């Protein structure tokens, strides 16, 4: 019975990440449709940020590689934008795109390497 509990918890965690990814993707599409091309471009570029970091030959376990896979960094961008004085929608959708990518990776079991988040 103790073997089954972590397996169920892992599945639930993936389901939660998947639901969060769907919500974030829908929110990013809504914001992109509302504000136009610059917001769409920002969301797509930051959605591809982990791949862009990999193409720039940033390999694990470097600090930059780990930074683009951390949840709290785009979350700080989103919260800071929401409560801060800056009004520039591409910044918000960039955070949405980045967090969506991280949530999708976590939902499919590809968390941050070299940590307990994986």
Image: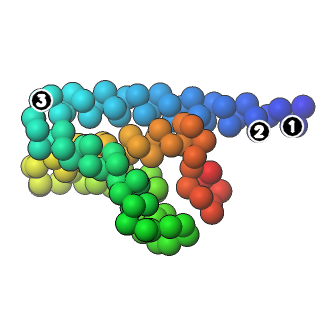
Query: Which residue is situated farthest in the bottom direction here?
Result: 62
Marks 2 and 1, how far apart at CA: 6 Å
* Residue 83 image position (x, y, % from top left): 21, 49
Write down the residue under mark 1: 3
Q: Quadrant location of residue 93? A: top left
Seen at 57% across and 37% down, the residue is 108
Question: For the residue labelled by badge 2, is the local secondary structure a helix, a strand or a loop?
Answer: helix
Up-down relation of residue 30 to residue 100 (above or below): above
Q: Quadrant of the N terminus?
A: top right
Residue 9 appears in view? yes
Write down the residue under mark 2: 6
Seen at 57% across and 29% down, the residue is 15
Q: Is residue 69 left or right of residue 13?
A: left
In this rendering, the label closer to the viewer, 3 or 2: 3
Near-viewer residue (57 or 8): 57
Q: Earlier in the sequence, mark 3 or mark 2?
A: 2
**Crowd tier of the residue under label 3, counting other residues whose Cα lies within 10 Å: few below 14, some 14–19, many 20 or above:** few
Marks 3 and 1, how far apart at CA: 48 Å
Marks 3 and 2, how far apart at CA: 42 Å
* Residue 33 image position (x, y, % from top left): 15, 28
Tell me the tag on residue 118.
none
Question: For the residue labelled by badge 3, is the local secondary structure a helix, a strand or a loop?
Answer: helix
CB contact under 8 Å: marks 2 and 1: yes
**Crowd tier of the residue under label 2, counting other residues whose Cα lies within 10 Å: few below 14, some 14–19, many 20 or above:** few
* Residue 39 image position (x, y, % from top left): 15, 41
Question: For the residue labelled by badge 1, is the local secondary structure a helix, a strand or a loop?
Answer: loop
Indicate how the structure is coloured in the image.
rainbow
Write down the residue under mark 3: 34
């Amino acid at each position: 019975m103790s073997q089954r509990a972590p397996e169920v918890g892992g599945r639930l965690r993936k389901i939660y990440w998947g639901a969060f990814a769907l919500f974030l993707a829908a929110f990013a599409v809504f914001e992109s449709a509302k504000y136009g091309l610059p917001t769409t471009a920002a969301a797509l570029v930051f959605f591809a940020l982990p791949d862009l970091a990999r193409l720039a030959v940033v390999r694990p376990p470097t600090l930059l590689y780990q930074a683009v896979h951390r949840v709290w960094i785009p979350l700080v961008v989103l919260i800071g934008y929401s409560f801060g004085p800056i009004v520039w929608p591409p910044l918000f959708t960039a955070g949405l795109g980045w967090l969506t990518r991280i949530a999708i990776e976590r939902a499919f079991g590809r968390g941050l390497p070299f940590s307990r988040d994986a």
